[in-house]
Structure formats: structure tokens, C-alpha cells
Image: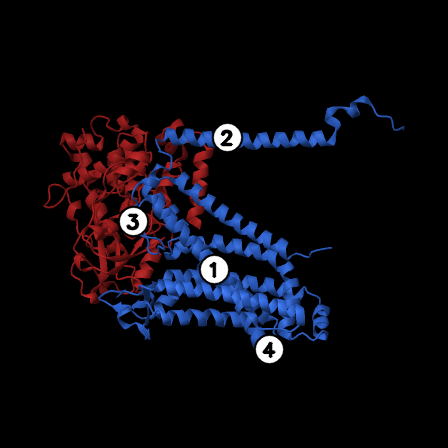
Chain colours: A blue, B red
Amino acid sequence: MSDNTTPSNNSFLNDAGNRALIFQILLLAMVVFAGYYLFSNLQANLDNRGISTGFSFFNEPAGFPILIHLIEYTEANTYGRAFVVALINTFVISLLGIILATIIGVIMGLARLSKNWLVARLATVYIETLRNIPLLLQMFFWYFAVLAALPAPRDSYEFADFLLNKRGIYSPNPLIQDGFGLVIFGFILSIVASIGVIIWAKKRQTRTGLWFPAYWTSLGVIVGITFIFLAMAGFPIEFDLPQKSRFNVTGGMVLPPEFVAVLVALSTYTGAFIAEIVRAGILSVNWGQTEAARSLGLRDSMTQRLIVLPQALRVIIPPLTSQYLNLAKNSSLGAAIAYPELVAVVMGTTLNQTGQAIETIGLCMLVYGSLSLSISVFMNWYNNKMSLIER
Amino acid sequence: MKSNVCKLLSTAAIAATISAGAAASTLEDVKAKGFVQCGVSTGVPGFSNADDKGNWTGLDVDACRAVASAIFGDAQKAKFTPLSAKERLTALQSGEIDVLTRNTTWTYTRDASLGLDFTAVNFYDGQGFMVRKDLGVKSAMDLDGATVCTEQGTTTELNMADFFRKNKLSYVPVVVQKADEALAAYDSGRCDVYTTDKSGLAAHRTKLADPSAHVILPETISKEPLAPVVRHGDNQWKDIVTWALFVQVNAEEMGITSKNVAKIKAETNDPSIKRLLGVEGDMGSQLGLPADWAYNIIAKVGNYGEVFDRNIGPSTPLDIPRGLNALWTEAGGIMYAPPVR
């Protein structure tokens, strides 16, 4: 056959690009129609059954208490404010969980690679145990087992001014007095000074090759300068000490067992997964890199920090992102042990009191969706920053 | 997690079905499938509780069996869906169950804005507090500063908050998702006080390690009329569920029990009893039910007093006094049913 083309081959439909476009449009139309159909159906059914809809309940007084609130909240506040309180609780537990899980994961991942037999085996036992037990069970364990082991408030363990009992960990509550502004000024000054130290150390190293322990020095600078200003202001802090009372402990600050149990369960569980990711990342770095670093005369700690870890991070970050996302979503299990996070407050109490199932569940999905997406966006940015720059 | 998944599914069910509830009447649906689907609790002894063979018993279970007896003449033609406090209303709204017989408090908002109708009160309850005996607390007014455990997703959360606010008492709330875990938290010493409806306190106390070490305080801080719930808009179905209970209350008042109902039906000369038992007239057809519907309820399930004594009365571990739930003819009772005529 010759290469002459029949007229039909030139038609609009035979062009691959046009066909793809048509399929895209058809698919989009189907998705939009399906969405519209479901939504209008929902509206019609809700109307038929006399179920009221809308978010107007957000302005009504909630009337229920919340155990842990980092902003001012009483029963007289609105459902909207209760939502914000729950949102903050979810953010806080996710953020602290991510930080702690990362620290635990890096330590355990390195420990499993350790040449010390005992350390490596202990890390293996930790990872294999925690990875293989359902998270909800671990939460119940930390909550109920730890509660059972601790004494009642009247028989609290006491260390200095700290109290430990079934109701939580109580610490003195620092109350800021007049003159604290001076201390804040000193703190800011110390940070500026330590940044100066770091810049100077970097420049000196580039110029002379001499290494200077800049980070330890700047830590000393911050603590030292802040303390001097604290002394100059005459220690403008008073402590509200926890006191045992009839039922509970009054005064002081309290870390409730619900918070501790959720945080410990989330971070140790996710930490076990992160440990394996870290181990895989480090093993992926060619042994020749370490040998090369040693032959340049770098110490072991510097070899790890400057040569191995930066290359391992390229392998570590993508799966690490998934673990962070898991942790944020798993925080919703806290509802089972009375940690007042989003699912507990919004999908639990608010849903029950107002009966607005579609609105509250939709809102929760939106929040978890945006939380996960923001973690993803941040981690992708970090991944791009760390990835191999090819010239 | 499970409850959330269930709720999402039932929400999707609302979205996906085309007005299933409005199309056919619930009675026709029930007759077509051959059984009544009732929503019950996940386990409250005396009210709705499954034994190790999966047989459900309890006051609320009997309310469901009474409806099954009225329609089919067979108390066993009832199936039960265990629901948490959070799931129960959505399950009914979405048509997953036909009637919710799950110690559910009748409140204005639930009745007015959720597309639901409450039938007749089958248990007059009220919220109370349980504490350890060794605390030496005699009254709820002594609870200033206490830590209080309760289950999430019930009216108790709000009642508790209102009570402490009204009396200017401080407290620490520990709100746990499921009743069993809330009770476990109380039992482990996380809380000084456990609060829920008094019937629930009596039921839960039997589950504690040492029931005699706990005491229920005298105060009743709320009105909790518990009633079966149906979907709004199916008036015939609502009447059936309502009158299934009224028949039982009337039977107790007339002295008819499951033991003597056959004898009374054969021998009685009382026209009101004849009407009730379907000997004269055809009361059942007005509800789309067989003529002997009331007879079947009494014969298969019993009158209200029998049901109460069997499940939660003084001879059971729950040992709940009749109190408000005695007949109106007794001292202190308010259980009253309109006449069948």
C-alpha cells in the first residue's frame, strides 16, 4: 500500500488529540452529572423527611464542656467555637505526634543498624512489636493500663512540686509578673546574637577551614543571656503550685492522661514505621560514600550528618510523607479514649445534639482533606529542596 | 472508626435512594419482608442485651417484639441492629431500621427537626450520678471539683453541663466515645463520678468489678422519657408502634397477663376486654392489622408489668423500683394509656 491517506483518516474524529479531548469532556460531564444527581437527590430526600439543613447551628450556644481547650472555652460558647477548639486539639496532637514520631523513628532506625548487638536487637523488638499491633488497641493499652498503674489523687506520687496520679501530670503554673518585658527583650537579643555566631562560624570555616561548634555555642548564648536578663528583672515569675483537694488536684498546670495516651500511642506507633523508612534510606546510600568520607578524614558523626543522611533523605522523604499523613488521620482515634479532637467534638457531640449529619461529616472530611493536603504540599516542597540537583 | 464508617454509609444511603421511605408504607414493607427490623443498643442489660447465643432480651427488645406480635402474631419475627448512641438516629432516618427501640430520650429538637416521631413513653427515666461508696458523698451537691465520666453522643452530656453550671460547681468532664469504655475509665479511677440515666446506672453497675462498692446518688437531674422512635410522615406505622405499648399498659390495668389471656378471652363478658382482645368488633383493621393483634401482644410478650418485672424489676440484678413507671392507679405512678375503643 502507498502512503496516500483516505479522506476519512483526516477527519476530526481520527485525530488522536481530538479524540482524547472528547473523552475528557465526556468523562467530566459524567462526573458533574453524577455529582449533581447525588446532590439533588440528597436535597430532595432531606426535604421529604423534614430534616433541616445548613450551618446556622454554628452560632448557637453549644452547652457542652470540652476537657482540653487551648483557647478560652466554656459551655456558653457557640458550636463554632467548639469546632475551633477541636480543630486546635487535632492540629496540636498531629504536630507534636509528627515531631516525636520523627525523633523516635530516626533514633530507632539508626539503632537497628547499630553494630552493638543489644541495641540493634532492642530496636528490632520495638519496631516489630509496635508495627504489628493495631493502633486503637495500643491507645486503649496506654490509657487503661497506665491509669490502672497510677495512684488516686489523694496518694499522688510527688517529685518536687510535681504531682503524678490517675488524673494526669500536674506541674507548677508559671504566672508572669510585672517586668517580664525585659526578659522577652533579652531573649530576642540572645537569638540575634546566636544567629550572628552561626554566620561568623560559617564564614570562618569557608575562609580558614577551621570548624567551630556554633550550635552548642548559640544554645549557651541564648540560655545565658536570657538568664542574665531574668536576674536583672528580679525573676518576675511566680508559680501557682498544684494542691491536693477533696476529689482532684487544684491549681497548677495539668497534662491529662487522655492527651498523654494519644500522643504516646501515635508517636511510638508511627515511629516504628519511620524507623524502617530511615533504615532503608541509610542502607540505600552506597558504602563507598562512607569510605570516601573516612578517607577524607571526617569523623563518624560528621560522616553520618554531612554525607550519609543528606543522601538518605532523598529516599526517606516520600514514604515519610505518607507516615505523616497517616498520623494526622489516625489522631481521630483519640475520640475512643476521650481526647476531644475533631471527630469526638464535631462528629460526636455536635452531630448528636444538632442532628446535622451531612454538615458535620462534610466539615470533618474537609478539615482532614486540607490538613493532609497541606502536609503533602510542605513535604513535596521539602523533597524538591533536598532532591539531587543535577547540573 | 466503625461507627464513623457506618454513618458515612448511611449518609450515602440517604443520598443514593430515591425517597424509599415515602414510596411505600412501612407496614407494607415489613409485611413484605416478613419481619420487623429494630434498632437496639450495643448492650444495656435489662433494656437490650444479647446473650451468648445471640438472643436479644430486655424492655426495649420486648417493645419491638410487641410490634412483631401485633403484625405477624409471632414475637420472634423481629431482627435487631445494635447501634451506638451516635448512629441510632441516622440509621432510622436512612431507612436501615423500621423502628428504633433503644432507650432514646424524647426531646424537642429530635422530634421537631430530625424528621423523626416519638411514639409513647415506655420508660420514664432521669439522669443520675454514681460514685464510689468510700468517697462518702451523700448528695450531688457535694460534687464540687469532681471528675465526671460519661458516654458521648447522648443527652447526658448536656444535662451534666447544665446541672454543674446551674449549681455553680466546678468539674472536669471526661467524655468517652462508647459507654463500655466510659465505664472502664470510671472503674479504673480516672473519674470520681459516672453519670447517665438512672436505669443505665443500675444496668452498668452490674458490670463493675464490685457493684456493691458503688452507690447511686438520690438526685435526678433531668427528665428522660424514653420512647420508641419512627420516621416522620408514616402515621399508620407510628400508630401501630404507639398502640402496641398502650395495649400492654391497658392489659396490666385490666389484670390481663400472658398466663390468663386465653382463659379471659374465652370467658369474659366485659365488652371493653372483648373489644381489646378482638372478640367483638374489628379494632385491628383500623391499623391494617389482624383482629387478634392485641391478644397476640399480650399472649406472646405480656402486659407492661410483666415485661418490666421480667427485665428490670426487683427480682432482676438491676433491681429498679417501679417508681414513675407504675400504673397511674398506683401511688407515684404516671404510666397511663388511652382506652381501646
The residue that disc 3 covers is A64
Image point (78%, 25%), residue name: A10
Write down the chain letter for disc 4. A
The residue that disc 1 covers is A97
Residue A134 in view here: no
Residue B229 in view here: yes
Discs 2, 4 touching: Cβ within 8 Å: no
Q: Which amino acid, mark 1?
A: Gly
Write down the chain letter for disc 1. A
The residue that disc 4 covers is A116
Write down the chain letter for disc 2. A
Secondary-structure class at tag 4: loop
Q: Which amino acid, mark 2?
A: Tyr
Label located before the other in sequence (1 or 4): 1
Q: Residue B157: where, in percent of width, then height?
A: 28, 50
Discs 1, 3 touching: Cβ within 8 Å: no
Calculate the distance from the C-alpha at mark 1 to the C-alpha at mark 3: 27 Å
Calculate the distance from the C-alpha at mark 1 to the C-alpha at mark 4: 28 Å
Q: Residue B245: where, in percent of width, then height?
A: 24, 38
Calculate the distance from the C-alpha at mark 2 to the C-alpha at mark 3: 36 Å
The label number, if any, that marks residue A36 in the structure image: 2
